[in-house]
Image: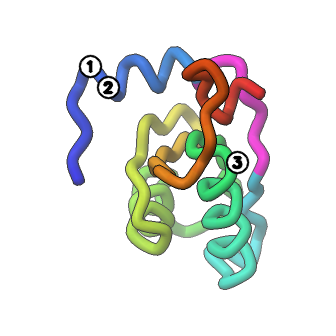
Protein backbone atom coordinates (compact mmCIF):
# COMPACT_ATOMS: atom_id res chain seq x y z
CA UNK A 1 0.00 0.00 0.00
CA UNK A 2 2.60 2.51 -1.09
CA UNK A 3 1.57 5.92 -2.28
CA UNK A 4 3.02 7.46 -5.42
CA UNK A 5 4.80 10.81 -5.14
CA UNK A 6 2.19 12.48 -7.33
CA UNK A 7 -0.63 11.27 -5.06
CA UNK A 8 1.26 12.32 -1.94
CA UNK A 9 1.83 15.81 -3.40
CA UNK A 10 -1.88 16.20 -4.16
CA UNK A 11 -2.80 15.14 -0.61
CA UNK A 12 -0.21 17.52 0.88
CA UNK A 13 -1.85 20.33 -1.05
CA UNK A 14 -5.31 19.29 0.21
CA UNK A 15 -4.03 19.09 3.81
CA UNK A 16 -2.96 22.75 3.89
CA UNK A 17 -6.43 23.91 4.87
CA UNK A 18 -7.04 21.26 7.52
CA UNK A 19 -6.77 21.74 11.28
CA UNK A 20 -5.35 19.03 13.54
CA UNK A 21 -8.29 16.93 14.70
CA UNK A 22 -6.36 14.41 16.80
CA UNK A 23 -3.82 15.31 19.50
CA UNK A 24 -1.21 12.96 20.92
CA UNK A 25 -0.62 14.05 24.51
CA UNK A 26 2.01 13.25 27.13
CA UNK A 27 0.68 9.68 27.46
CA UNK A 28 1.90 8.95 23.94
CA UNK A 29 0.19 6.50 21.64
CA UNK A 30 -2.48 5.37 24.07
CA UNK A 31 -5.19 3.04 22.69
CA UNK A 32 -7.77 5.84 22.83
CA UNK A 33 -5.58 8.06 20.59
CA UNK A 34 -5.17 5.25 18.05
CA UNK A 35 -8.93 4.62 18.12
CA UNK A 36 -9.67 8.34 17.65
CA UNK A 37 -7.35 8.50 14.62
CA UNK A 38 -8.87 5.30 13.23
CA UNK A 39 -12.38 6.75 13.56
CA UNK A 40 -11.31 10.04 11.95
CA UNK A 41 -9.68 8.23 9.04
CA UNK A 42 -12.81 6.15 8.52
CA UNK A 43 -15.00 9.24 8.19
CA UNK A 44 -12.59 11.81 6.70
CA UNK A 45 -9.77 9.80 5.00
CA UNK A 46 -7.29 12.71 5.35
CA UNK A 47 -6.46 13.69 8.95
CA UNK A 48 -3.92 15.96 10.64
CA UNK A 49 -2.49 14.94 14.01
CA UNK A 50 -0.69 17.20 16.50
CA UNK A 51 2.14 15.24 18.16
CA UNK A 52 3.32 15.77 21.73
CA UNK A 53 6.35 17.91 22.51
CA UNK A 54 7.15 15.72 25.51
CA UNK A 55 7.83 12.44 23.71
CA UNK A 56 11.19 10.70 23.70
CA UNK A 57 10.56 9.71 20.08
CA UNK A 58 10.93 11.93 17.03
CA UNK A 59 7.77 13.07 15.21
CA UNK A 60 8.63 10.83 12.22
CA UNK A 61 8.92 7.76 14.44
CA UNK A 62 5.62 8.56 16.18
CA UNK A 63 3.94 9.12 12.80
CA UNK A 64 5.26 5.79 11.54
CA UNK A 65 3.93 3.98 14.60
CA UNK A 66 0.51 5.64 14.25
CA UNK A 67 0.38 4.77 10.54
CA UNK A 68 1.22 1.13 11.30
CA UNK A 69 -1.39 0.97 14.08
CA UNK A 70 -4.13 2.39 11.83
CA UNK A 71 -3.10 0.85 8.46
CA UNK A 72 -2.76 4.33 6.97
CA UNK A 73 -0.13 6.24 5.00
CA UNK A 74 1.90 9.15 6.35
CA UNK A 75 1.43 11.97 3.85
CA UNK A 76 3.84 14.38 5.56
CA UNK A 77 5.39 15.37 8.86
CA UNK A 78 6.08 19.06 9.41
CA UNK A 79 7.41 19.99 12.82
CA UNK A 80 5.13 18.21 15.27
CA UNK A 81 2.17 17.90 12.91
CA UNK A 82 1.65 14.75 10.85
CA UNK A 83 -0.89 14.12 8.12
CA UNK A 84 -2.34 10.66 7.49
CA UNK A 85 -4.42 9.20 4.66
CA UNK A 86 -6.44 6.00 4.40
CA UNK A 87 -8.99 5.51 1.64
CA UNK A 88 -12.43 4.30 2.66
CA UNK A 89 -14.33 2.89 -0.35
CA UNK A 90 -17.57 2.85 1.69
CA UNK A 91 -17.77 6.65 1.89
CA UNK A 92 -20.37 8.12 -0.43
CA UNK A 93 -18.88 10.88 -2.56
CA UNK A 94 -21.20 13.61 -3.76
CA UNK A 95 -20.10 14.98 -7.14
CA UNK A 96 -16.61 13.52 -6.56
CA UNK A 97 -15.99 15.76 -3.53
CA UNK A 98 -13.60 14.13 -1.05
CA UNK A 99 -14.87 13.80 2.53
CA UNK A 100 -12.27 16.13 4.06
CA UNK A 101 -13.65 19.08 2.04
CA UNK A 102 -17.13 18.85 3.56
Specify the quadrant of the image occupied by residue 30. Answer: bottom right
- The residue wearing badge 3 is 50
Tell us which disc is closer to us: 3 or 2. 2
Mark toward the start of the polypeptide (3 vs 2): 2
- Magenta residues span 15-21
- Side of 92 where 102 appears, left or right: right
Residue at 44% in and 35% down: 76
| Distance between mark 2 and mark 1 Cα atoms | 4 Å
Q: Position of residue 86 (x, y in %)?
A: 46, 51
Q: How is the image coloured?
A: rainbow
Q: Is residue 36 above or below residue 94?
A: below
SS label for mark 1: helix
Residue 70 higher or lower than 76, as above or below: below
**Contact between labelled residues 2 and 3, with CB atoms less than 8 Å apart:** no
Sequence-first tag of 3 and 1 = 1
Q: Is residue 80 visible?
A: no
Residue beneath the point at 21% across and 31% down: 4
Q: Residues within 10 Å of mark 1 (few under 14, many from 20)?
A: few
Q: In terms of depth relative to the viewer, which is nearer, 26 or 33? A: 33
Gap between marks 3 and 1 measured at Cα: 24 Å
Q: Residue at x 32, y 25 (%)?
A: 7
Helix, strand or loop at label 3? It is strand
Position of the N terminus, as image quadrant, is bottom left
Q: Is residue 97 above or below residue 64?
A: above
Marks 2 and 1: CB-CB under 8 Å? yes
State the residue position of label 1.
6
The answer to which quarter of the image holds residue 93 is top right
> Which numbered tag is attached to residue 7?
2
SS at mark 2?
helix
The tag on residue 15 is: none
Amino acid sequence: MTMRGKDRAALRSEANGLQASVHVGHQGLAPNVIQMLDDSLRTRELVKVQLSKHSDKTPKVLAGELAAATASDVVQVIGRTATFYRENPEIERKDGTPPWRR
